[in-house]
Amino acid sequence: MIRLHQLEKAVRSGAGQLYLLRNVNLTVGKGDFVTLMGPSGAGKSTLLAVLGFLDAEWDGEYDFDGQAVHRLSPKDRQALARKHVGFVFQKYHLLDDLTVAENLEVPLSYRGFSRKEIQARVADVLDRFQIVGKKDLYPAQLSGGQQQLVGVARAVIGEPSLLLADEPTGNLHSEQAREIMQLFRRLNDEGTTIVQVTHSAENAAFGKRTVRMADGWLKGEEPTR
């Protein structure tokens, strides 16, 4: 699904350049579950942003599902992201003035679904994630775990082939974190490819392999199950 070849990203720093990613070579197959680990500043979130088409300022090659991303126009990259990628963030990123159901509708509204299909998908996801009773509540009325559950539901409602998660349990207590990671495991077992960033060895154990990063370099990897 994903192949990165000699991918690098640098930003200006004083009179020179500061490299955030250096000579990154990485392959992620369909159905994989990869964890990126390393100290703060290792480049984990930067790499995740590149994978999710949120950052286009880099050099090298990025092939996604047979398409050469490095040769695509910004418009085509955006279309690819909307069709294939779901994002789960540490701080939930729910829209405070929308209900749970309305938050779930947002990613579908960008993809041209009919009103009837949007309603059907929202109803299905509310049931699947067991949050039907929360559909008319606003984010401020939910616990942190419930907000993250809605965040995951919103990320997968469009049935993305790739789910990216940046410290998805960083604001949750251990039981809530375990529930979210068990949900990720189920999604992966159903065929969703997942790449997550985490500092938690327990969270990493839910994946299939862990890639270590430091100072923008990939330092090695090991299987986790």
Image: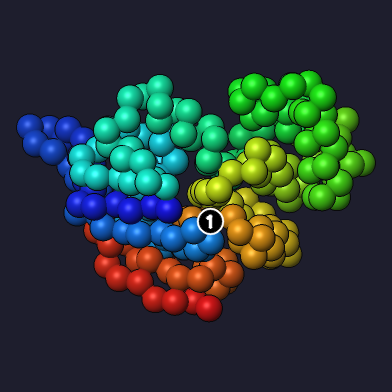
In the figure, 110 relative to 35: above or below? above
Write the residue at 36% across / 24% down: 74
Q: Residue furthest right?
A: 133
In the figure, 57 relative to 193: above or below? above
Left or right: residue 121 compared with residue 26? right
Other residues around mark 1 within 10 Å, as few (<14) / some (14–19) / many (≥20) = many
Closer to the camera in the image, 3 or 210: 3
Which percent across, then down, holds residue 109?
A: 67, 23
Q: Residue furthest front?
A: 66
Closer to the camera in the image, 216 or 6: 6
Which percent across, then down, holds residue 108?
A: 67, 28
Q: Is residue 117 visible?
A: yes
Write the residue at 71% across / 44% down: 153
Write the residue at 35% across / 59% down: 27
Left or right: residue 195 compared with residue 39? right
Q: Residue furthest left?
A: 15
Left or right: residue 24 compared with residue 169? left
Left or right: residue 76 compared with residue 192? left
Which percent across, then down, holds residue 134?
A: 87, 39
Closer to the camera in the image, 111 or 20: 111
Secondary-structure class at tag 1: strand
Q: Is residue 140 visible?
A: no
Q: Which residue is tagged 1?
A: 194
Closer to the camera in the image, 142 or 135: 135
In the rendered view, how is the structure colored? rainbow
Write the residue at 86% across / 46% down: 127
Task: Residue type at mark 1: give it.
Answer: Ile
Which percent across, then down, holds residue 70?
A: 27, 36
